[in-house]
Structure formats: C-alpha cells, structure tokens
Image (spheres, rainbow, N blue to C red):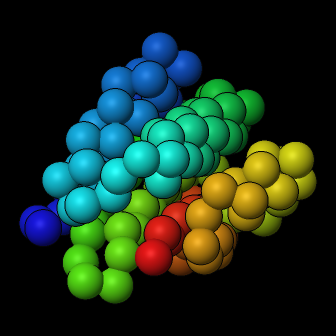
Amino acid sequence: MPVVRVSFTPAPAHVRTVRLVAGAAAQQAGVRGEALDEVRFAVGEACAQAVARHQRHGLREPVRLECEGNGGGFTVRVSDRAPAGESADPVAMALLSGLVSDLRTTPGINGVGTTVVLHWR
C-alpha cells in the first residue's frame, strides 16, 4: 500500500476527518473488524493530543499524519511542531498503549515537535 500523508490545521474539528482517512487507509491495508475500530480510535486520540499541544502554544503550523501498510502490519505517525520537551498526557498514552501493538514517541529535531508512532501487527 502506498503511504498516505495528510497535513491538517490544528483544530479539533479536523480530527474526525483525519480519523476517517486513517480508517480508510487501514482498511485498504487489510485491517479488519475490531482492529479497524482500534485504529480509528487511537488515531483520533493521537491527533487530538497533537492539536491540543499546538493550541496550548499558539501554533498554526499543520499537524502531520502518515499511514503505511505493509506485510508487517499497519503504521501511523502523528507529528506535531510543539516544543518536544512537553510530556505527553499520561492518561492518553496509557489508552493508546492498550490499543496498539507497538507505541513509540520520538522527539523532533532541535527540540521542536514530537512524533507518535502507532503500529498494529
């Protein structure tokens, strides 16, 4: 499956749309049943957290979403441009860790941005 990339304005109203895009990409990659619901829910939460970080810092730069399916599963990356030192909401991270096979966060370059990587096998 080709990589799907979406950039969106950091507004809560766009999270639903991006969640639907990720769900469609997951379905195209062969994700089915409850796992498809988990993808939609987890992507929505990760994007909502990125939007909230942008809003707290008054950032207008877009949040980026990247979806990729391959023989090893389905991977979603949500990248923001908020200060990388800001810790993630522990409740949101606990929720996400229960929905995905592998969850990682990586800081951006020069202390700017965070990428949340969600992977389903």
Q: Quadrant of the C terminus?
A: bottom left
Provide residue 85's location: percent of width, then percent of height. Answer: 78, 65
Q: Quadrant of the N terminus?
A: bottom left
Q: Residue at x 34, y 31 (%)?
A: 20
Dividing the picture into quarters, in which one does residue 77 lie? Answer: bottom left
Provide residue 28's location: percent of width, then percent of height. Answer: 17, 53
View extreme (top): residue: 13
Q: Residue at x 41, y 61 (%)?
A: 76
Dividing the picture into quarters, in which one does residue 110 lie? Answer: bottom right
Q: Nearer the viewer, residue 41 or 45?
A: 41
Q: Residue at x 83, y 57 (%)?
A: 94
* Numbered-mark total: 0
Quick check: 109 left or right of 19? right
Q: Residue at x 49, y 41 (%)?
A: 37
View extreme (front): residue: 33
Mark yes or no: residue 10 visible. yes
Mark yes or no: residue 60 visible. no
View extreme (left): residue: 2
Residue 100 vs 14, above or below: the answer is: below
Quick check: 81 left or right of 57? left
Provide residue 60's location: percent of width, then percent of height. Answer: 47, 31
Provide residue 93's location: percent of width, then percent of height. Answer: 78, 56
View extreme (right): residue: 90
